[in-house]
Amino acid sequence: MKQSMTSTAVEFKNVDIIFGDRQKEAVPMVDAGKTREEILDATGCVLGVADGSIRIEEGEICVLMGLSGSGKSTLLRAVNGLNKVTRGEVLVQDGDTMVDVASCDAKTLRHMRTERVSMVFQQFALLPWRTVAENVGLGLELKGMPKAEREAIVEEKLKLVSLDKWKDKYAHELSGGMQQRVGLARAFATDADILLMDEPFSALDPLIRDHLQDELLELQRNLKKTIIFVSHDLDEALKIGTHIAIMEGGRIVQYGEPEEIVLNPANEYVAEFVAHMNPLNVLRCASLMTEVENMRRDGDQLILDKYDAFKVDLDGQGAVVKATFDGKLDLKLFSYSEETELADIVSDCVVALASPDITMKRAIELRQATGNPVLLVRDGRLVGVVGDEEIYQGILRQSSIADAAQ
Amino acid sequence: MSSIEEWLIGHKIPVGKWGESFFDFLIDNFSGFFDLFSDVMSFLIKGSVEGLLYLPPIVLVALIAALAHFLQRSWKLSLFVFLSLLFIINQGYWEEAIQSLVLVLYSTLVCMLVGVPLGVAAAHRPWLFSILRPILDLMQTIPTFVYLIPAMILLGLGMVPGMIATVIFAVAAPIRLTHLGVSSVPTPLIEAAESFGATKSQLLWKVEIPFALPTIIAGVTQCIMLSLSMVVIAAMVGAPGLGVPVLRALSQVKPDMGIEAGLAIVIIAILLDRLCKQRNAPVKGA
């Protein structure tokens, strides 16, 4: 089934995935909203995914998140047909058309697997009797590419993951982190635009995991693939994902951008995840700050803290013209941008002006470097302030979600 | 009670007759095929034996020692091969040893040609394996003499019925081990290949066979050993080789002859086992 072009890379449309022989009986039960246990008891079928619908745009990293058994891997594996879809469509972009992987013929599926979609596995799944280079070339070999052509591409992809010196080693001679880099290179080798990653870093040490996450983000900056990433770790999901789908018992319970999920967990299950995550890199100042309308005033001046120590003057357009401490000391205004090195901020007679889109972590760093509250400015106008009070509240908010979840 | 027994005995199920009529059916309808098969195989086997015996024994011994070095890169093994083969010449069983060796190698070849494809097919189709398993059990446990009789009737006396009896006894090993190797390929490896678009035959040749290879080779070694253990039985249907002096020693009560021929069989067994052993330990799974 082919449809007209959009910038959508992958779209799940009401996808049900059921394992077992009596799927016909199980489908109406899914429609009736029965739980997984009820369906298993009545039909002996295991509900993998129920009514999953998400649209993933080109260049996004969509993280499917949930506890083990929540159906996240099952949904992922529908994209390259490793799991059969019982009902619904899995549309994957191929040139100007969208191919429904759930219903296409074997030849089309093979085309999608060799050209459009590649995959990275949790346990690496490297062939132990092949060298690193032979493993990386697997996809190209299966496509039928001649050896000479293959070698150049393999070399290039190995350089990308900085393993070119290891190409003649066998997979088991490498550490876990390196093996997964081979897995990444193998997935990159076919130049497929869509990358499926099934808990790729879960089998690794926390430090190596962190390192590989950074590497992946770095690579993604240049490669701009569409990545569907499965994880059971919200911190990982928040760090990597541009969008997150949270799954529970085979159903998608919430789908949105990371901050949206942290700020408004859809139910207790999501709230419990959120309670255990680290908010520093996710929350943005816009959702922490005291807004300019809510600040106390002293004549023409706005008061920034509860001790009435910091005050700022605004001009007619709402731009900051002067900041003072204790009414005497003038503070220098320092415009912060992403390129600024924090080390450049030397004196403590400085107050930072920053975008409300900076993360909580960055705000704390600025607060610490300057010793003063951080002024948040959008389009030249002051929109709010983040000082100690706001930072404490941001952290406490997190732990109160944790309390509520328990 | 006794009446039930009488009834039981009185109504004997003619299993033996059924089997016999099955073989009659084979003889009536396929004797041409069996004759052809018998002729081709005995031509091949006899040709091989004559070819090997045409060479001066010392030259052949040196060649086998060189082969040992080529396969295993061990001069100790080559020396052992050289000396033990000289011992067989010294004892006067060279011709018989070559005949047995050829018979064993042809039996193993046939076993692998039949066993590996069957093992692969059974690994892909659980129903086929559930049919095969009792047949394999039967072939390995049924007393050899039972099927020697129809084999003799179908193929006459000589090398070929000996080889067939050997194959029936030994073919279960490669089937079982190939099945084991192919069906124990870890699912992630299969899925990895599938996710990059592997076809069924690519999956077989690029993933399943390479993964199962160490197990399949273990099947070859086992097959050789089982074939060798059939040397004496094969001699009973007229297959020449080291089994013949053993049988003669038995019928003429000659312990010295029995010991000499028996030692020669043991030497051949050790040599073949060491030659076929895998040099590298099998690679661990992913």
Image: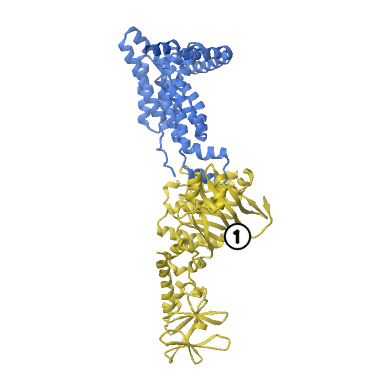
Chain colours: A yellow, B blue
- Mark 1 Cα-neighbour bin, 10 Å: few <14, some 14–19, many ≥20: some
Identified by mark 1, the residue type is: Glu
Give the residue furthest to the left. Answer: B255
Q: Can residue A36 be seen in this view?
A: yes
- Which quarter of the figure is the N terminus of chain B placed in? top left
Residue at left offset 60%, top offset 51%: A88
Residue assigned mark 1: A58
Q: From the viewer's perspective, tell me whether residue A1 is left or right of residue B216.
A: right
Residue B91: x, y in percent? 35, 15
Residue A157: x, y in percent? 53, 53
Choose top left, top right, bottom left or bottom right for residue B74: top left
Residue A328: x, y in percent? 43, 92
Tag count: 1
Q: Which of A48 and A65 is in front in this view?
A: A48
Residue at left offset 48%, top offset 21%: B106
In the rendered image, the vertical position of residue A405 relative to residue A67, given as above or below = below
Tell me the chain of label 1: A
In the rendered image, the vertical position of residue B61 relative to residue A324, given as above or below = above
Residue B250: x, y in percent? 34, 10
Q: From the viewer's perspective, tell me whether residue B121 is left or right of residue B224.
A: right
Residue at left offset 41%, top offset 72%: A396
Q: Nearer the viewer, residue B32 or B12?
A: B12
